[in-house]
Amino acid sequence: MATGDYPLFVYGTLRSESDHEFARLLRGASDFVSVGRVRGSLYRIAQYPGWVEEESLGGPLPYGRGSEAGSVHFEGSVIQSRDRKGPDRWVTGEIWKPHEPASLLATLDRYEGPEYNRVVRSVDTPQGPADCWAYLYVASIQGKERIISGNWLA
């Protein structure tokens, strides 16, 4: 899979608060860029989450619009949402810039496995939208618990 010159948005076991071995690998091989969020919903798959784009709303939601007046407030490393459609319309996470993207992303692709596709999406950040790689969950969510907050660590 291509690597492009994009940072990586992570929302689950790869986040900095995680003690998972691949989170430690990411921290050691990347620089932290920002907190951020993407449109969609988060589901508890097992001991890890899966982010899906919100098809129930008629297809993928538009990206890069979360910074419109009144819809998003960033406070430190916590993202507060005033989106009246509900906090579950956003998935919160972090953006990391790999030192050697080809090698690191190949390793993370293997870790994520066939349940996830690495895709480029616009991520809302306190500095404005940023195009990033992110792992989109592509397997079935039937019977999976939706994480209403959109935050795996909440």
Image (cartoon, grey):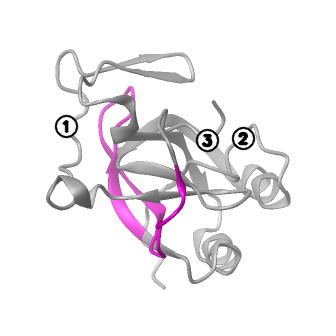
Residue under circle 3?
Answer: 152
Q: Give the range drawn in magenta.
A: 119-145
Q: Where is residue 59 in the image (x, y as percent from the top left)?
A: 18, 62
Measured along the vertical axis of the image, is residue 27 above or below residue 135? above
Q: Where is residue 31 in the image (x, y as percent from the top left)?
A: 65, 46
* Mark 3 neighbour density, 10 Å: few (under 14) some (14–19) many (20 or more): many
Please tell me whether residue 141 belongs to the stretch shown in magenta. yes
Give me the disc on residue 108: none
The count of marks equals 3
User: In the image shown, does 81 or 15 lie closer to the viewer?
Assistant: 81
How dense is the environment of label 1, judged by Cα within 10 Å: few (below 14), some, or many (20 and up)? some
Task: Of the two numbered discs 2 and 3 on the same chain, state the one appearing first in sequence.
Answer: 2
The amino acid type found where label 3 is placed reads: Trp
* Residue placed furthest toward the left: 58
Name which residue type carries label 2: Ser
User: Considering depth in this image, is 59 or 103 the residue closer to the camera?
Assistant: 59
* Residue drawn at (55%, 77%) of the image: 115
* Residue at disc 3, secondary structure: loop
Hey, which quadrant is residue 68 in on the image? top left
* Earlier sequence position, callout 2 versus callout 1: 2
Give how far apart the Cα atoms at labels 2 and 3 are. Answer: 12 Å
Residue under the image location 48 percent in, 85 percent down: 1
Residue displayed at 41% across by 49% down? 41
**CA gap, disc 2 and disc 1:** 26 Å
- Residue 144 locus on image (x, y percent): 54, 59
The residue pinned by badge 2 equals: 16
Q: Name the residue under label 1.
A: 65
